[in-house]
Image (cartoon, rainbow, N blue to C red):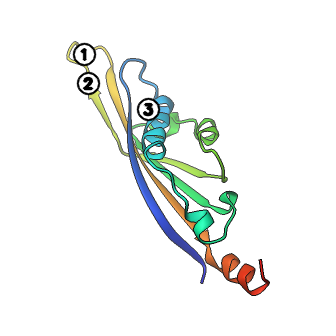
Amino acid sequence: MPRKRMVIEYGMGTSLRRQDYTQAARRAVENALWRNSLTLAELFGFARDDMRIEVEIGVQKPEAVDTEALKGIFPYGAPEIRARHGGLDTPKPDGNGATLIANCAIIVSFDMDSAAQGKENGS
């Protein structure tokens, strides 16, 4: 049994004035994370750092997202963060800039073979 997807959580974040794609992405990730308290690791006998965390962030300019800066948001695990085209830039009525909207999906999975091996070895 290879990696098994356990949770998908979604979030949305904005940058209202500064047009900062990384800040909008940060808010989207926090929106997804701060609404949950998952105990899946303990349920399956894993350490929290055993979680495989994949993060997909959608913004209009993915190259403007500092994905390395976003890794510090996660309390444990080693997230893989990818920015891709998505989200929405809404022009301001006066034509001076835009409000940026970022969407994210956080996918948590575990290597279930590790859990099975731990049980066989009495761990």
Q: Earlier in the sequence, mark 2 or mark 3?
A: 3
At label 3, which amino acid type do we have?
A: Ala
Observer-nearest of 61 and 33: 33
Left or right, 8 with reference to 112: left
Query: 51 left or right of 16?
Result: right
Find residue 43 and report its image quarter.
bottom right
Q: Nearer the viewer, mark 1 or mark 3?
A: 3
Which residue is under mark 2?
91
Give the residue pinned by disc 3: 24
With respect to residue 64, does 108 lie above or below?
below
Quarter of the rendering containing residue 17: top left
CA gap between label 2 and label 3 equals 15 Å
Q: Nearer the viewer, residue 121 or 89?
A: 121
- Amino acid on which disc 1 is placed: Gly
As helix, strand or loop, the secondary structure at mark 2 comes to strand
Task: Decide: few, some or many residues near mark 1? Use Cα within 10 Å; few <14, some 14-19, many ≥20.
Answer: few
Residue at left offset 63%, top offset 45%: 75
**Residue at the location (32% across, 23% down)?**
98
Marking on residue 95: 1
Q: Earlier in the sequence, mark 1 or mark 3?
A: 3
